[in-house]
Structure formats: structure tokens, C-alpha cells
Image (tube, grey):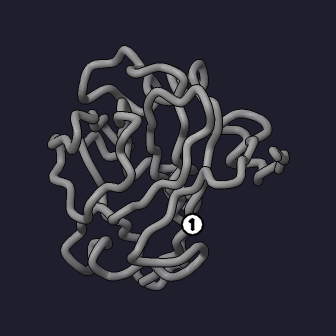
Amino acid sequence: MQTKQTVSLVAIALFGATIVFAAGFTVSSPMFTQGAKLPTAITCDGAGNSPALGFGTPPKGTKSFAILGWDDDAPSGLASQWVVYDIPIGTKSLPEGIAPGSSVNGFKQGKNSFGKLGWSAPCPSKGAKAHHYYIDFYAINATSLGLAAGAGLNAVHSAIKKHKLLEAKLLGIYGR
């Protein structure tokens, strides 16, 4: 059964109106649980590795996946930490520490808000309030978004909106 949930106005402004969730379609990490503190290994205070992720059962019609990782509390508004797309349908997980510009199973990495390919480790200012970091995992109804590797956030997000079937979210919190 599918249910509808409305997310915060900030997320609605960036990612479109209502998000539809389906049982079994999930994104998780063996490194942290929903709403928990991010481990140092994936932040600027550690190795700055991309997080290990696991994926639940995709909805019918899914042909690929995409990931947008973002900071909801960035001083500039929203900042993307990670842009990944054209993840093949058979992918069940991603390992920790994927190198910038590299590919696992043929997926592509785009440029984040810092103009870099790959994961940009969370690094809020020391003494600032803790930031909320989201991993948005999308079921896509096309095998490819039709974008070259290195595409920017706006191009990838626009393509996701055209092809999104469902979305799952994982939240981690980090402060320094």
C-alpha cells in the first residue's frame, strides 16, 4: 500500500511537492541509523569517505536509481553533498569510500554544490548548530537520465523530476 507524506517546506521547494513512499523501498546505511549522528569517517573530521548505503525493494517499473545527498542547514540555503545517477537496477548497495569521479556498476557522479565530483564530506562550522544531512534515493523509470558524467545538480534534479517513480530518505545529523 502506498501512503503520501508531506515533507518540510524547504524540501518541497527543492524537490517537488508530495513524496510517495512504498513499503520495502528504502535507503539505509550500516554506518548510522535514521536521524542519528553521522560517523566521523564520512565527515571532514575523519577520512571524508562517502557512506556505505543499502537499498530496499524497488517499485515495479524501476529501471535505475539516483541519489542526491544534501545539507538542509547550509548557510547558503541547501547544499548538495553528493550527486549520483544512472545506478543500475540490480544494485543493492554502495560501499563506503567511493572515489570522486569513479563508478561502481557503471553509475555516474555529478558535480555537487562545491563544484566537485563525488561526495563532499559534511563539515559544518565549529560551534554552529548541528546540520541535517539527507540522502534522497530515487527509483527512476528510465535506464539512464541521458546526462553525461559530471552533470550539475540542477540538470540531474530536473531529469529526476521527469522520471521519478518513488523516493526514500535517510537522515543523519552532524555538528562540530
Q: Residue furthest top?
A: 146
Q: Residue, x 47% and y 54% (percent of image)?
A: 55
Instruction: Using the image, determine if residue 24 lies above or below residue 51.
Output: above
Three-letter amino acid code of the residue under disc 1: Leu
Nearest to the observer: residue 136 or residue 140: 140
Q: Quadrant of the C terminus?
A: bottom left
Q: Position of residue 122 (x, y in %)?
A: 37, 66
Instruction: Using the image, determine if residue 16 lies above or below residue 29.
Output: above
Q: Residue, x 54% and y 23% (percent of image)?
A: 141
Instruction: Using the image, determine if residue 23 lies above or below residue 67.
Output: below
Dividing the picture into quarters, in which one does residue 151 lie?
top left
Q: Position of residue 43 (x, y in %)?
A: 32, 72
Nearest to the observer: residue 144 or residue 155: 144
Residue 75 visible to the viewer: no
Nearest to the observer: residue 6 or residue 81: 6
Q: Residue, x 25% and y 65% (percent of image)?
A: 96
Circle 1 is placed at which residue position?
171
Residue 22 visible to the viewer: yes
Q: Residue, x 23% and y 79% (percent of image)?
A: 46
Circle 1 crowding by C-alpha within 10 Å: few under 14, some 14–19, many from 20: many
Q: Position of residue 79 (x, y in %)?
A: 47, 50
1 to the left or right of 79:
right
Q: Position of residue 31 (x, y in %)?
A: 39, 77
Q: Secondary structure at mark 1?
A: strand
Nearest to the observer: residue 28 or residue 68: 28
